[in-house]
Amino acid sequence: MLAIIGGSGLTQLSTLEITRREVVRTPYGEPSGAVTFGTLADREVMFLARHGYGHTIPPHQVNYRANIWALKHVKATAVVSVASVGGIRADFAPGTLVAPTQIIDYTWGRKSTYFEGGEEAVRHIDFTHPYDEPLRQRILKAAAVAGEAMFNGGVYAATQGPRLETAAEINRMEGDGADLVGMTGMPEAALARELGLPYAAINVVANYAAGRASSEAGIHFDHIEAVLHEAMIRVRRVLEEVCKA
Ligand code: HPA
């Protein structure tokens, strides 16, 4: 069964017909909330709100290990992550949807692996292509069927947050090759890979990154909320098609 992790702007899937909720205990502590099961476009899916259902857990305190472990435990077969981002590339304007292809991890101090030594032999997962390509293609195809524009490809920079970046940090990230910046993409993607769960993302550009275009003088959250509200309507349509595919 497909799992959807919703981020800022998507703490609920309003079109999900809920059948049950399951509180999962994990060896890594508590997930962000109960896993919600239901049907979307008549297909069974499960949903988890990354920041909690009341949006109270900041990006650096999300228990990514518990979340991914919980989804695997209740038999998720793939994970689609929805996450809002800042657009670094000039054509990634607010409201743009992107299916990213790459990640640069700038986060620190997060519990970012299930492999902690002890009795277990050391394992190094291959992470050359951090997103599962068949799942990414399924998302892109779903967007096309839904008639929603989505960029194919982009480099996601994962920052620690919860503060936004400085203009100079964004310049540096762009120099590194980043197109998008968000706070939750890592270690989530790597943990999914460690557990063998195909994982891909839909990034929703909420704002131009710090110092860029309309964010030159600053980033204003009241505006971001309006952008996300509108964009998530389109994301829900895409998700329905992802479920049908
Ligand atoms: N930076 C980091 N994370 C974000 C941003 C941003 O500008 N917008 C939405 N999530």
Image (tube, rainbow, N blue to C red):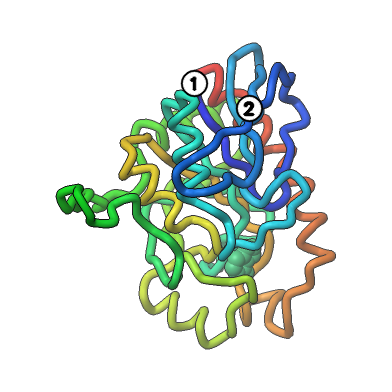
Count of marks overlaid on the render: 2
Left or right of residue 196, residue 210 in this image: right
Left or right of residue 196, residue 6 in this image: right
Q: For marks 2 and 1, give the CA distance.
A: 15 Å
Amino acid type assigned to the residue bearing label 1 in the image: Met
- The disc at residue 1 is 1
- Residue at point 44%, 44% (across, down): 27
Q: Is mark 1 within 8 Å of ligand 1?
A: no
* Few, some or many residues within 10 Å of mark 2 (<14, 14–19, 20+): few
* Residue pointed to by mark 2: 22
Dot 2 or dot 1, earlier in sequence = 1
- Hey, which residue is sitting farthest bottom in the picture? 168
- Residue at point 67%, 30% (across, down): 237
Amino acid type assigned to the residue bearing label 2 in the image: Glu
- Contact? badges 2 and 1 (CB < 8 Å): no
In this rendered view, identify the residue nearer to me: 209 or 25. Answer: 25
Residue 89, image x, y percentages: 51, 67
- Residue at point 19%, 49% (across, down): 119
Residue 79, image x, y percentages: 47, 35
In the rendered view, tell whether residue 124 sits above or below residue 133: below
In this rendered view, identify the residue nearer to me: 23 or 39. Answer: 23
Q: State which image quarter holds ligand 1.
A: bottom right
Residue 147 in view: no
In this rendered view, identify the residue nearer to me: 32 or 45. Answer: 32
Report helix, strand or loop for mark 1: loop
- Residue at point 71%, 16% (across, down): 19
